[in-house]
Amino acid sequence: MTIKDIARLSGCSVATVSRVLNQYPDVSEQTRQRVMEVVELHHFRPNSNARHLKQQAGKRISVIVKGTQNMLFSEMVEKVQLRVQDRGMDAAVYYVDEDANEVAFALQVCREYKPPGVLFLGGDLEYFQRDFAPIGVPCVLLTNSAQSLGFANLSSVSTDDTAASERATDHLFSHRHRNIGILGGNWSGSQISYRRIVGCRNSFEKHAVPFDGERQCEPCRYSFAGAYAATGRLLERNPGMTAIFALSDVMAIGAIRALRDKGFRVPEDISVIGFDGIPVGEFSVPRLATIRQDTKRMAERGADILLDRLERKLPPVHETAPFQLLAGESVTVRRDWG
């Protein structure tokens, strides 16, 4: 009896069986029970390789990724892993739901596997403020700034989300749009989405245009399907809008699909701009206008800061990565201007 046999009999992948046998926390209880039922039925005993993996866990940094459908983070994970490997270490990657408490999950990982450090891709500052103190190893948060929290073992590398969102909204105003819909995100004050909304408000105020959140904003998850459904709701509530600012490229692409399915042309009828600069936006039709985050810099600096802190005692570091507006093809001048 091998792990492959266990996988076949339980209907799970070999990787999932391995994670169950090595007691990884990122496996559902239902899946864990299904695998263990097969293990007990056939009296399977893991070989020394599984024990070896357990012993090696404490030598790998942990990477906690917030959200399972965030294409920006998928791109960054690869860059982090390459940087870590270049410096002679390894990384174990865990995914949590975008609404989950990533800090509580990290604490569980630290207690079970004792990684030397943790790198978070995405995070809710409210969870960090409330739950981070028991984590004693060096940590780095990417895409959200932890500077205001004041933890001695928590660094961060992020984009200035407020300035970047203001720039994106300015771009729509420069194309004579005034009735602009805002799509996506969780607007809690501890969330990245909130700072992006603040940037939108700043742009509206600068252009002397009233901002009506009840009419113009529609929250949703960072997913194609979530944005698709939210765009329909936004159109019903604000049928006169001529442009949409989606708080991520994934949501922007979901919005474009929804608009087209409802008979609107993009950008001729409704312009759309996103945020992130993921590669798929360059190949969408039309090519997506967006704010490109410097994911390479954030990933590599995040890994370097964490590894540097493992090698010697250093104070926390908080850096801001640059952003760039990509004009794309999904924004045009409002047709009915003048």
Image (cartoon, rainbow, N blue to C red):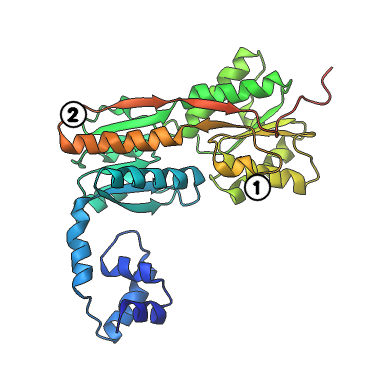
Q: Nearer the viewer, residue 126 or 195?
A: 195
Any part of residue 251 in sight: no
Q: Is residue 128 left or right of residue 219?
A: left
Q: Quadrant of residue 30?
A: bottom left
Q: Nearer the viewer, mark 1 or mark 2?
A: 2
Q: Residues within 10 Å of mark 2 (few under 14, many from 20)?
A: some
What residue appears at the point 30 percent right and 59 percent down from the top-left corner?
A: 25
Q: Secondary structure at mark 1?
A: helix
Q: Residues within 10 Å of mark 1 (few under 14, many from 20)?
A: many
What residue appears at the point 65 percent right and 22 percent down from the top-left corner?
A: 171
Q: In the picture, which quadrant includes the N terminus?
A: bottom left
Q: Position of residue 232 (x, y in %)?
A: 70, 44
The dot on residue 95 is: none
Labelled pair 1, 2 in contact (Cβ < 8 Å): no
What residue appears at the point 76 percent right and 49 percent down from the top-left corner?
A: 261
| Up/down of 320 relative to 109, above or below | above
Q: Secondary structure at mark 2?
A: loop
Q: Position of residue 185 (x, y in %)?
A: 53, 38
Q: Which residue is mark 2?
A: 314
Q: Position of residue 319 (x, y in %)?
A: 35, 25
- Kind of residue indicated by mark 1: Tyr
Residue sticking out furthest to the bottom: 42
In primary-sequence order, the first of circles 1 and 2 is: 1
Q: Position of residue 16 (x, y in %)?
A: 37, 67
Q: Nearer the viewer, residue 108 or 17?
A: 17
- Kind of residue indicated by mark 2: Leu
Q: Is residue 165 left or right of residue 288?
A: left
Query: How far separated are the C-alphas under marks 1 and 2?
Result: 45 Å
Q: Quadrant of residue 220?
A: top right
Q: Which residue is mark 1?
A: 228
| Up/down of 153 relative to 72, above or below | above
Q: Is residue 271 left or right of residue 8?
A: right
